[in-house]
Image (cartoon, helix red, strand yellow):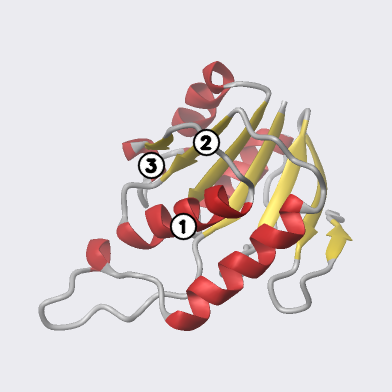
């Protein structure tokens, strides 16, 4: 199974009248997500499912990636991808979604999920708009949102 772990792009700050759940992507956030989506598209990836946290910035990230990947399936908002849910709950829901699944969410939950999926005590934190691939329980590579390069994911 391939799990593409994706952190949402840069979002506006919460403030008066704008709760954390309502935060949306900034112009920079949208641009960066589109760029990493293009790099991911160049790998020839065809996803079975795109799953996202129900928070606005994650949903927007998932939608932009789906557009870049020419993904025509449903983007499923999963409450278990919201902040604070244990990674074992998310992992249990992934297996029924297909062999190639993208998961869009938040830190530190995504790092916890990466550690859980790879059977490691920890996993490097994801930068905003970063994509990490965990394949068959092994960390493989990540797309660096600053350089747009695909690098091998090395863990100690």
Which residue is rendered at x = 40% and y = 72% of the image? 25
Of residue 133 and residue 36, the one placed in the foreground of this image is: 36
Circle 1 crowding by C-alpha within 10 Å: few under 14, some 14–19, many from 20: many
Which residue has dot 1 on it? 106
Instruction: Decide if residue 111 is in sight here.
Output: no
Q: Is residue 133 above or below residue 35?
A: above
Q: Is residue 147 above or below residue 111?
A: below
Q: Secondary structure at mark 2?
A: loop
Q: Secondary structure at mark 1?
A: loop
- Dot 3 or dot 2, earlier in sequence: 2
Which residue is rendered at x = 25% and y = 78% of the image? 14
Which residue has dot 2 on it? 72
Discs 3/2, front: 2
Residue 87 position, x and y percent, is 50, 38
Figure quadrant of residue 44: top right
Residue 53 position, x and y percent, is 39, 47
- Dot 2 or dot 1, earlier in sequence: 2
Circle 2 crowding by C-alpha within 10 Å: few under 14, some 14–19, many from 20: few
- Left or right: 99 in relation to 128: right
- The Cα atoms of the two marked residues, 3 and 2, are separated by 28 Å
């Amino acid at each position: 199974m391939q799990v593409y772990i994706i952190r949402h792009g840069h979002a506006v700050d919460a403030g008066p009248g704008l709760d954390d759940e309502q935060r949306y992507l900034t112009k920079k956030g949208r641009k960066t997500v589109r760029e990493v989506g293009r790099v991911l598209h160049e790998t020839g990836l065809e996803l079975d499912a795109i799953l996202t946290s129900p928070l606005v910035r994650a949903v927007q990230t998932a939608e932009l990636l789906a557009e870049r990947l020419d993904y025509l399936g449903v983007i499923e908002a999963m409450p278990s991808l919201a902040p604070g849910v244990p990674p074992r709950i998310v992992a249990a829901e992934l297996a029924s979604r297909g062999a190639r699944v993208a998961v869009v969410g938040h830190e530190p939950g995504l790092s916890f999920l990466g550690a859980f999926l790879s059977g490691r005590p920890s996993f490097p934190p994801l930068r905003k708009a970063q994509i990490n691939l965990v394949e068959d329980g092994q960390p493989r590579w990540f797309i660096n949102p600053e350089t747009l390069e695909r690098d091998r994911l090395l863990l100690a």
